[in-house]
Amino acid sequence: MALSCHSMDSPAQARAAEALVAAARRALAIEARALEALLERIDASFVAACRLCLDCTGRVVVTGMGKSGHVARKIAATLASTGTPAFFLHPAEGSHGDIGMTTRHDLVLALSNSGETPEILMLLPHIARLGAPVVAMTGKRDSTLARNATVHLDVGVPEEACPLNLAPTASTTAALAMGDALAVALLEARGFTAEDFARSHPGGSLGRRLLLHVEDVMRRGDEVPRVRPDTPLAQGLVEMSRKGLGMTVVVGDGLQVLGVFTDGDLRRALDARIDVHAATMQDVMTRRCRSIGPRELAAEAVHVMETHRITALPVVDAAGALVGALNVHALLRAGVV
């Protein structure tokens, strides 16, 4: 049960709760203003930074210290998963050998709110010798890092959300948002698609939805329930029950799909008082049934089933011949649903 801030509170507790709410709202308002201010800074410098990233034949090396380092890690991960090869370099480790991972083909994206972080400044001479461009993201336009960068992105904020104006709060939010803006702009410029995104997320549910095809989860060969149109209804029921898909496919010459027979068709046949001993599959099957191709995404099979309120589908090739079958349980096991 949700709790109200004022339920069963004493006056002192109510005042304390109101103070907490006021502090949180003040923090969010400050950070919202910081983000709003970034809109005017999406300018020629931002375009230049994007062009450097697009022209980069190596990787984007993202670096930052402290809280800026945490933001840098996230930006590197976002870039890498949206089509821009990137990795995080800890600046302190960089000055003890890890800078060797950087090549002249790379681009360095350096984050420092002050622009004076010693661990990052120590790396600048080596980066300059390599000839790799530097995009600096700082809160001080006249800082050492900003002056020595190829391109500077201003993410300065007038105040932190912290009432002491000390803890990095609004400044890290602004840097994170600018990193997201850069990643999204690059994503669109590269024509990055949902399928491209899924390729870098093969282990998650998103990857399964966007990469898994019908042929990866369908039944094949003798596991597919199928009968001829002149098969007696009783025999068709046995086939449907034995294969456990909740349907059987009715096929003609060359395995051409003529229709399907499901539990629903059986109920309709019984309601119509059809002689189950004399009837054949062509008497009770559903013609013009829904089907799907083996190269369709498994997620599309889910969509077809949900749209038409069915639980199984025959899988057909381009000529309409049966090549497999699947039901909602197979999609559930595969993690598509």
Image (tube, rainbow, N blue to C red):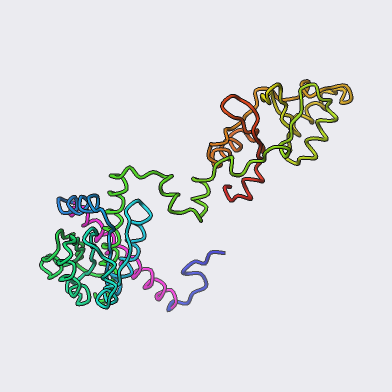
- Expressed as whole percent of the image width and height from the top left, the position of residue 54 reads 24, 50
Query: Is residue 41 part of the magenta span, yes or no?
Result: yes
| 17 lies above or below 294 | below
Answer with left or right where residue 235 lies relative to residue 55. right
Closer-to-camera residue (201/32) = 201
Quarter of image, res 111: bottom left
Q: Main secondary structure of the magenta part?
A: helix
Closer-to-camera residue (301/4) = 301
Answer with left or right where residue 199 lies relative to residue 292. left
- Expressed as whole percent of the image width and height from the top left, the position of residue 156 reads 19, 64
Q: Quadrant of the N terminus?
A: bottom right
- Expressed as whole percent of the image width and height from the top left, the position of residue 50 reads 22, 51
Closer-to-camera residue (191/168) = 191
Quarter of image, res 30: bottom left
The count of marks equals: 0
| 3 lies above or below 308 | below
Residue furthest right as drawn: 277
- Expressed as whole percent of the image width and height from the top left, the position of residue 220 reads 67, 39
Range covered by the magenta-colored residues: 13-42
Query: Is residue 331 part of the magenta span, yes or no?
Result: no
